[in-house]
Amino acid sequence: MNLKSYIRTVPDFPKKGIMFRDVTTLMQNRIALSQSIDDLYSLIKHKKIDIVCGIESRGFIFGSPLALKLGCGFVPIRKLGKLPSETVSIEYSLEYGKDSIEMHKDAIKEGDNVLLVDDLIATGGTIQAAAKLVEKAGGIVSAIVFLIELTDLHGRDKLKSYDVYSLLEYEGE
Ligand code: AMP
Protein backbone atom coordinates (compact mmCIF):
# COMPACT_ATOMS: atom_id res chain seq x y z
CA MET A 1 0.00 0.00 0.00
CA ASN A 2 1.39 3.40 -1.00
CA LEU A 3 0.72 5.52 2.08
CA LYS A 4 2.11 8.65 0.40
CA SER A 5 -0.79 8.58 -2.03
CA TYR A 6 -3.14 9.20 0.92
CA ILE A 7 -1.28 12.32 2.10
CA ARG A 8 -2.49 15.55 0.55
CA THR A 9 0.05 18.26 -0.23
CA VAL A 10 -1.29 21.80 0.13
CA PRO A 11 1.07 24.41 -1.36
CA ASP A 12 1.53 27.77 0.41
CA PHE A 13 -0.11 26.75 3.71
CA PRO A 14 0.06 28.22 6.32
CA LYS A 15 2.28 30.68 4.46
CA LYS A 16 3.81 31.14 1.03
CA GLY A 17 6.53 28.67 0.13
CA ILE A 18 5.46 25.92 2.57
CA MET A 19 4.33 22.59 1.11
CA PHE A 20 1.97 21.44 3.86
CA ARG A 21 1.77 17.66 4.19
CA ASP A 22 -1.84 17.14 5.22
CA VAL A 23 -2.25 13.80 7.01
CA THR A 24 -6.00 14.24 7.61
CA THR A 25 -6.60 12.56 4.23
CA LEU A 26 -4.63 9.52 5.43
CA MET A 27 -6.35 9.51 8.83
CA GLN A 28 -9.84 9.53 7.33
CA ASN A 29 -9.17 6.32 5.39
CA ARG A 30 -9.53 3.30 7.70
CA ILE A 31 -7.12 1.09 5.73
CA ALA A 32 -4.41 3.75 5.38
CA LEU A 33 -4.72 4.74 9.04
CA SER A 34 -4.47 1.15 10.19
CA GLN A 35 -1.53 0.44 7.84
CA SER A 36 0.36 3.53 9.05
CA ILE A 37 0.02 2.42 12.69
CA ASP A 38 1.15 -1.13 11.82
CA ASP A 39 4.14 0.23 9.87
CA LEU A 40 5.15 2.66 12.64
CA TYR A 41 4.92 -0.21 15.11
CA SER A 42 7.20 -2.38 12.93
CA LEU A 43 9.87 0.34 12.99
CA ILE A 44 10.14 0.49 16.79
CA LYS A 45 8.81 -2.80 18.14
CA HIS A 46 12.33 -4.04 18.99
CA LYS A 47 12.91 -1.11 21.36
CA LYS A 48 12.39 -1.22 25.11
CA ILE A 49 9.49 1.15 25.71
CA ASP A 50 7.59 1.79 28.95
CA ILE A 51 5.52 4.76 27.88
CA VAL A 52 4.64 6.69 24.72
CA CYS A 53 4.69 10.52 24.60
CA GLY A 54 2.91 12.22 21.69
CA ILE A 55 3.21 15.86 20.68
CA GLU A 56 0.14 18.06 20.26
CA SER A 57 -1.85 17.49 18.26
CA ARG A 58 -1.21 15.02 15.44
CA GLY A 59 1.28 13.18 17.63
CA PHE A 60 -1.73 12.20 19.77
CA ILE A 61 -3.50 10.59 16.83
CA PHE A 62 -0.58 8.35 15.87
CA GLY A 63 0.90 7.96 19.35
CA SER A 64 -2.16 6.67 21.14
CA PRO A 65 -2.83 3.60 18.93
CA LEU A 66 0.91 2.89 18.94
CA ALA A 67 0.84 2.86 22.75
CA LEU A 68 -2.04 0.37 22.67
CA LYS A 69 -0.12 -1.93 20.30
CA LEU A 70 2.97 -1.71 22.51
CA GLY A 71 0.94 -2.37 25.65
CA CYS A 72 1.97 1.01 27.12
CA GLY A 73 0.26 4.09 28.45
CA PHE A 74 0.17 7.41 26.60
CA VAL A 75 1.30 10.87 27.75
CA PRO A 76 0.38 14.10 25.94
CA ILE A 77 3.01 16.81 25.44
CA ARG A 78 1.04 20.02 25.01
CA LYS A 79 1.34 23.71 24.28
CA LEU A 80 1.59 25.89 27.38
CA GLY A 81 -1.50 26.34 29.57
CA LYS A 82 -3.58 23.34 28.45
CA LEU A 83 -2.71 20.80 31.17
CA PRO A 84 -4.60 21.12 34.46
CA SER A 85 -2.12 19.75 37.01
CA GLU A 86 1.50 20.53 37.91
CA THR A 87 3.72 20.55 34.82
CA VAL A 88 7.32 20.57 33.70
CA SER A 89 7.94 22.80 30.68
CA ILE A 90 10.62 23.80 28.21
CA GLU A 91 11.10 26.81 25.95
CA TYR A 92 12.49 26.52 22.43
CA SER A 93 13.26 28.82 19.52
CA LEU A 94 11.08 29.14 16.43
CA GLU A 95 11.95 30.84 13.14
CA TYR A 96 10.55 34.02 14.70
CA GLY A 97 10.35 34.14 18.50
CA LYS A 98 9.93 31.37 21.03
CA ASP A 99 7.43 28.70 22.05
CA SER A 100 6.99 26.33 25.00
CA ILE A 101 5.69 22.81 25.51
CA GLU A 102 4.89 21.00 28.73
CA MET A 103 3.83 17.72 30.26
CA HIS A 104 2.43 16.67 33.60
CA LYS A 105 5.19 16.34 36.19
CA ASP A 106 3.91 12.95 37.40
CA ALA A 107 3.28 11.55 33.90
CA ILE A 108 6.50 9.57 33.60
CA LYS A 109 8.55 7.86 36.25
CA GLU A 110 12.31 8.32 36.80
CA GLY A 111 14.12 5.99 34.38
CA ASP A 112 11.10 5.23 32.17
CA ASN A 113 12.00 4.34 28.58
CA VAL A 114 10.04 6.75 26.42
CA LEU A 115 8.95 6.55 22.79
CA LEU A 116 8.39 10.04 21.35
CA VAL A 117 5.87 10.32 18.50
CA ASP A 118 4.97 13.11 16.11
CA ASP A 119 3.42 13.13 12.65
CA LEU A 120 6.25 15.03 10.97
CA ILE A 121 9.79 16.30 11.43
CA ALA A 122 10.65 19.54 9.64
CA THR A 123 13.48 21.56 11.27
CA GLY A 124 13.46 19.25 14.30
CA GLY A 125 13.08 22.10 16.81
CA THR A 126 9.85 20.80 18.33
CA ILE A 127 11.00 17.23 18.80
CA GLN A 128 14.39 18.32 20.15
CA ALA A 129 12.57 20.33 22.82
CA ALA A 130 10.26 17.38 23.54
CA ALA A 131 13.24 15.07 24.03
CA LYS A 132 14.82 17.55 26.46
CA LEU A 133 11.49 17.82 28.28
CA VAL A 134 11.28 14.04 28.72
CA GLU A 135 14.82 14.05 30.11
CA LYS A 136 14.00 16.96 32.42
CA ALA A 137 11.10 14.87 33.76
CA GLY A 138 13.48 11.95 34.45
CA GLY A 139 12.74 9.79 31.40
CA ILE A 140 15.11 8.15 28.93
CA VAL A 141 14.35 8.73 25.23
CA SER A 142 14.42 5.18 23.92
CA ALA A 143 13.35 6.10 20.35
CA ILE A 144 11.70 8.83 18.30
CA VAL A 145 9.32 8.00 15.46
CA PHE A 146 7.64 10.11 12.75
CA LEU A 147 5.20 9.30 10.01
CA ILE A 148 6.90 11.88 7.74
CA GLU A 149 10.44 13.25 7.50
CA LEU A 150 11.20 16.34 5.39
CA THR A 151 14.75 15.32 4.58
CA ASP A 152 15.88 18.64 2.99
CA LEU A 153 15.52 20.38 6.34
CA HIS A 154 17.97 18.02 8.08
CA GLY A 155 16.00 18.03 11.33
CA ARG A 156 17.59 14.68 12.13
CA ASP A 157 20.92 16.49 12.68
CA LYS A 158 19.47 17.94 15.90
CA LEU A 159 18.74 14.42 17.16
CA LYS A 160 22.15 12.79 16.75
CA SER A 161 22.14 11.34 20.27
CA TYR A 162 18.79 9.56 19.73
CA ASP A 163 17.48 6.58 17.83
CA VAL A 164 15.29 8.19 15.13
CA TYR A 165 12.86 6.44 12.74
CA SER A 166 10.55 7.75 10.02
CA LEU A 167 8.16 5.94 7.74
CA LEU A 168 7.91 8.28 4.73
CA GLU A 169 10.48 10.71 3.37
CA TYR A 170 9.76 13.85 1.34
CA GLU A 171 12.53 15.71 -0.44
CA GLY A 172 11.89 19.02 -2.21
CA GLU A 173 8.56 17.91 -3.66
P1 AMP B 1 9.71 21.38 13.33
O1 AMP B 1 9.81 21.80 14.78
O2 AMP B 1 10.22 22.42 12.39
O3 AMP B 1 10.32 20.01 13.10
O4 AMP B 1 8.16 21.28 12.99
C1 AMP B 1 7.45 20.15 13.31
C2 AMP B 1 5.99 20.43 13.58
O5 AMP B 1 5.42 21.37 12.66
C3 AMP B 1 5.25 19.13 13.45
O6 AMP B 1 4.44 18.97 14.60
C4 AMP B 1 4.42 19.27 12.18
O7 AMP B 1 3.13 18.82 12.41
C5 AMP B 1 4.46 20.74 11.80
N1 AMP B 1 4.95 20.97 10.41
C6 AMP B 1 6.10 21.60 10.05
N2 AMP B 1 6.25 21.66 8.71
C7 AMP B 1 5.18 21.03 8.19
C8 AMP B 1 4.75 20.71 6.84
N3 AMP B 1 5.47 21.07 5.75
N4 AMP B 1 3.60 20.04 6.68
C9 AMP B 1 2.86 19.68 7.76
N5 AMP B 1 3.19 19.93 9.03
C10 AMP B 1 4.34 20.60 9.27
Image (cartoon, rainbow, N blue to C red):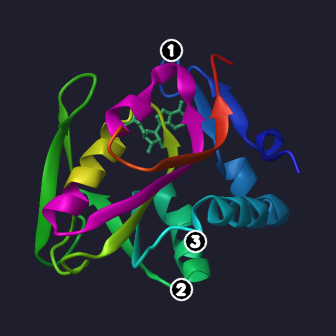
Q: Work out whether residue 77 or residue 139 is closer to the camera in this orientation and state it.
A: 139
- Residue name at image x 72 percent, y 66 percent: 38
- Give the Cα separation between the discs numbered 2 and 1: 42 Å
- Residue name at image x 58 percent, y 45 percent: 166
Mark 3 lies on a secondary structure that is helix
Q: In this view, does 49 lie above or below 15?
A: below
- Residue name at image x 55 percent, y 26 percent: 151
Residue 123 makes an appearance in the image: no
Magenta-colored stretch includes residue 84: no
Q: Are marks 1 and 3 in contact (CB under 8 Å)?
A: no
Residue 71, label in figure: 2
Q: Quarter of the image holding residue 93?
A: top left
**Amino acid marked by disc 1:** Lys
Q: In this view, does 146 lie above or below 60?
A: above
* Mark 3 lies on residue: 66
| Most distant residue in the right direction | 1
Q: Upstream in the sequence, badge 1 or badge 3?
A: 1
Q: Upstream in the sequence, badge 3 or badge 2?
A: 3
- Residue name at image x 69 percent, y 31 percent: 9
Residue 16, label in figure: 1
- Give the Cα separation between the discs numbered 3 and 2: 9 Å
How busy is the neighbourhood of tag 3: few (under 14 within 10 Å), some, or many (20 plus)? many
Q: Work out whether residue 125 or residue 95 is closer to the camera in this orientation and state it.
A: 125
Residue 92 makes an appearance in the image: yes
In the displayed structure, does residue 170 sit left or right of residue 25? Answer: left
In the displayed structure, does residue 5 sit left or right of residue 38? Answer: right
Name the quarter where the C terminus is drawn.
top right
Closer to the eye: label 2 or 1 = 2
Q: Position of residue 74 (x, y in %)?
A: 42, 77
Q: Where is residue 172 in the image (x, y as percent from the top left)?
A: 63, 16
Q: Where is residue 130 in the image (x, y as percent from the top left)?
A: 29, 52
Report the span colored magenta. 133-159
